[in-house]
Amino acid sequence: MALGTTVTTVGQQGQTTMRPNGLIRLSFAGDSAYPTGGTPDFTAYLTAALKREVEVTQVFGYGKTAGAITHIADYDATNDTLLVYVLAGTQATAAANLSTVTFDVIVAYR
């Protein structure tokens, strides 16, 4: 996975037996070469960051460049892929350098 190596847990809502789902807020740098169809294996990325097994169900948030929101993050649960859209509504182009984009996302998992 080519997402930025620094993952900061900004806040977290934990799991309990009464609430089997969790939410976590993450901040990370984007791919240095955005793959065609999105960044694959996002669940593996989050599992490694949290150091425990999780199943990602939803991702929502944005990416900022120089303090301005420039990208929207989304998640394709069927393919376990993190998708990035520019504000115009189209998916980021293949091989786009998103390493200068800092993503701030909320991840829902179980």
Image (cartoon, rainbow, N blue to C red):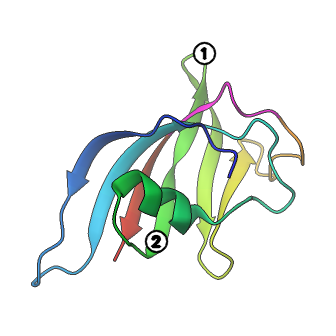
**What label does residue 56 carry, if any?**
2
Name the dominant secondary structure of the magenta segment.
Answer: loop
Query: From what the image shows, is residue 56 above or below residue 87?
Result: below
Distance in Å between CA atoms under marks 1 and 2? 29 Å
Nearer the observer, 65 or 87:
65
Q: Picture quarter containing residue 80?
A: bottom right
Decide if residue 49 is on the left or right side of residue 71. left
Q: Residue at x 77, y 43 (%)?
A: 88
Decide if residue 68 is on the left or right side of residue 70. left
* Residue closest to the far top: 66
Q: Residue at x 69, y 77 (%)?
A: 79
Q: Which residues are magenta?
A: 97-103
Which SS class for mark 1? loop
In the rendered image, residue 36, in percent from the top left (x then y), is placed at 87, 57
Q: Residue at x 34, y 77 (%)?
A: 110
In the rendered image, residue 14, in percent from the top left (x then y), is placed at 18, 63
Nearer the observer, 105 or 48:
48
In the rendered image, residue 98, in percent from the top left (x then y), is placed at 73, 34
Which SS class for mark 2? strand
Q: Residue at x 22, y 81 (%)?
A: 20
Decide if residue 41 is on the left or right side of residue 38. left
Decide if residue 41 is on the left or right side of residue 44. right
Mark earlier in primary sequence (1, 2): 2
In the rendered structure, which amino acid carries the disc numbered 2?
Val
User: Disc 1 vs disc 2: Cβ atoms closer than 8 Å?
Assistant: no
In the rendered structure, which amino acid carries the disc numbered 1?
Ala
Nearer the observer, 78 or 7:
7
**What label does residue 104 carry, if any?**
none
Q: Which residue carries the number 1 mark?
A: 66
